[in-house]
Amino acid sequence: MDLLMKNIHMCNQTKRAATQITLDEDLNVPDVRPDVEMIIQSREHITLEHTRAEAGKLYLDGFMEVSILYMDDTKERRIHRLDTRLPFDETLAMEGLEPGETARVRHETEDLSVSLINSRKLAVRALVSFDASVEEIYDLSAAVEVRQEETGKPTLQLCEKKQQLEYLQLEVQNKDILRLKEDIQLPSNKPDIREILWENVQFRGCRTRLETDKLTVQGSLFLFALYRAQDEKESLQWIEQTIPVEGELSCAGAAPGFVPDIEVTLAGTDLTAKEDIDGELRTFHLEGVLELNIRLYGTDTAEILSDVFSPEKNLEPVTEEETCETLVVRNESKCKTQGKIRIQSAKPRILQICHCAGIVRIDQTKVEAGTGIKIEGALPVSILYISADDTMPFAVLEGTVPFTHVAEAQGIDENCRYTLTANLDQLSATMSDSEEIEVRATIGLNLFAVRSGTVRCIHALQEKDYTTEQLEAVPGLTGYIVQDGETLWDIGKAYLQTPQQIAEMNGLPSEEVKKGDCLILMKVVTPPR
């Protein structure tokens, strides 16, 4: 007697840990750069170079690139840029971690502060958080049918009880990159490029589409570049441009019907000046990398064996509790938010907005049982503008626009595991007056939630003869009243009769019974085999 087994490929988060680190450095201004009068703007980018798993510990190393835009103390009040790297080497305690395991690490800069110590030295401070998780790939194995060997002897009468199992199966797990290369020509009314002083590149409006064995990524690169021009005054110029992006990646095993859990990150960009066909520096050459963390799931149902008995042999199922995941929701939603940011007394008045940049931060999520997830977060924005003060040609206005959103997720509860990714779809800033700017934004929120549960699966059957005591315990003839929730299968197992035998004996048109039905049960003696 053999069992036909079904294997379901699954993924479950088994370990998780988080930590915060502080990066601290005093940056000396190079001798070739003039003294610092005022810091205009700063930004950072984290590169995680290596992760290494050891027993109970995860080692992280990489660096933070910090760029600083400042105004010098000369009469011309010229703008300059400084770049530095802050390396880090951190150990994250993670209980149960085994050597060689692969961890998924997310990082976020919670605070970056650049302050002036003196005209030749700057203090750079940053607070960075890391969130690491390890997901276990495993197979759920369950019996779906009993098969009897063809030996020429009469086969056993088997009564199988089955249950419907809904499950989420991991079909594809992969990491890939999409390389981006774009050339952006200067408008005819802009002078040639002498030096790129500042740039900001964001990937917005990310959308993914699954096709057979491939994945399409769409979105837009939003580019801002501030540069010193090749004219007599070496004037400051800037451009803003939105570049549509569409790329295709090979993804073996992908199919349109799969449920995607895909995280897309703009990992790094490089902007350089490039000569055009006339040999003039009138082209910005942009290169970037989109990193994709890909998980594709299939949803399916299977009828698995939950119990089995025979009136002729005592069959004892060998069972084991298995973890099974089912899809709760895959939800894409949009959140619109707006707010006003007013300049402080120390800031010069606004003459013209140059550029507005922002990043979405999720502060808190709360499961609202049965309906969805309440998300509270903020959009810190940095607005570079031309000021009305001739002694301070450029200034930055910083502020935060809060948002609250409920991502719909019917049936979700505290026992569900979910991932939530946020990206900026649209961002605009307009002047209310010379002292106030109104910010409007659209935030994309992608929710993927699953519920983990356990199911008792049969892995083997032990076949024995019924003992004399077991057979004598079954009455020869009895009247039976069906109780609430009982089936003929349940009654048949208790009285060693098949549901078909009970139905025929009682003249039932089918094997369906309800509470209160009266049945006659007669013991059937089967000779041993």
Image: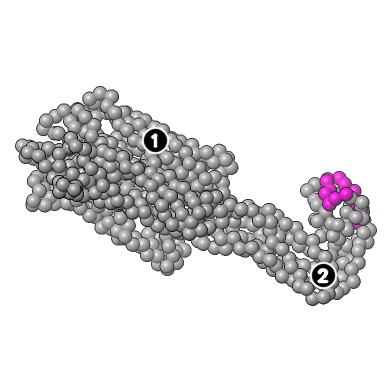
Left or right of 238 on screen, residue 103: right
Q: Is residue 267 visible?
A: no
Would you say residue 516 sits in the magenta stretch? yes
The residue range painted magenta reads 509-521
For label 1, the crowd category at 10 Å Cα-Cα, with few meaning under 14, some 14 to 19 and many 20 or more, is some
Q: Tell me how far mark 2 sits from mark 1, CA to CA.
A: 67 Å
Q: Position of residue 206 (x, y in %)?
A: 40, 44
- For residue 94, above or below residue 391: below
Mark 1 element type? strand
Left or right of 372 on screen, residue 112: left
- Point out the residue furthest to the front here: 277
Q: Position of residue 519 (x, y in %)?
A: 90, 51
- For residue 495, above or below residue 274: below
Q: Position of residue 252 (x, y in %)?
A: 48, 59
* Residue annotated with mark 2: 155
Give the residue at x 92% y 51%.
Answer: 507
Placement of the N terminus among the 4 image quadrants? bottom right
Residue 520: quadrant of the picture: bottom right
Q: Main secondary structure of the magenta part?
A: loop
Of the residues shown, which amino acid type is indicated by label 1? Thr
Give the residue at x 40% y 45%.
Answer: 218
